[in-house]
Amino acid sequence: MDMINELQEIFRDIFDDEELVISDQTTADDIEDWDSLTHMQLIAEIEEKYSIRFTTAEIKKAANVGEFIDIIAGKLK
């Protein structure tokens, strides 16, 4: 399974929406319920799944799902 599909499962779980489809371009503006609380839940779930930790700067820098994927991939190398 590729990373976008793995992240999509996390997003579907957090937002309780089995129909939710994300792409590299998906941002908080694209998902109605994406607020600061769900953002932190997403971060926590992603960190747990991949056994990584994001820095505050990385979290602030990532403007969309694709940029998060780039950061995750960099940490997994």
Image: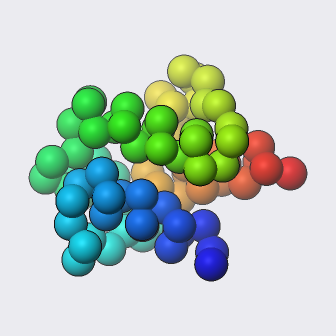
Front-most of 34 and 61? Answer: 34
The answer to whether residue 57 shows anywhere in this view is: yes
Q: Answer above or below: position of 31 versus 46.
A: below
On the question of residue 63 being in view, the answer is no
Measuring from the top left, give residue 28's x and y in whole percent.
28, 47
Residue 51 lies in quadrant:
top right
Residue at image x 40%, y 43%? 42
In the picture provided, is 58 more to the left or to the right than 12? right
13 or 54, nearer to the observer: 13
Residue positioned 68% across, 38% down in the render: 52
The percent position of residue 35, horizontal first and vertical second, equals 21, 37
Identify the colour scheme used: rainbow
- Furthest residue to the left? 32
Q: Quadrant of the N terminus?
A: bottom right
Give the x, y percent position of residue 10. Answer: 42, 58
* Left or right of residue 20, residue 56 in this image: right
What residue is drawn where x is 72% and y is 54%? 73
Circle count: 0
Residue at (37% x, 32% y) in the render: 40
Q: Quadrant of residue 20?
A: bottom left
> Does residue 5 lie above or below 10 as drawn?
below
In the image, residue 55 sits, relative to residue 32, either above or below, namely: above
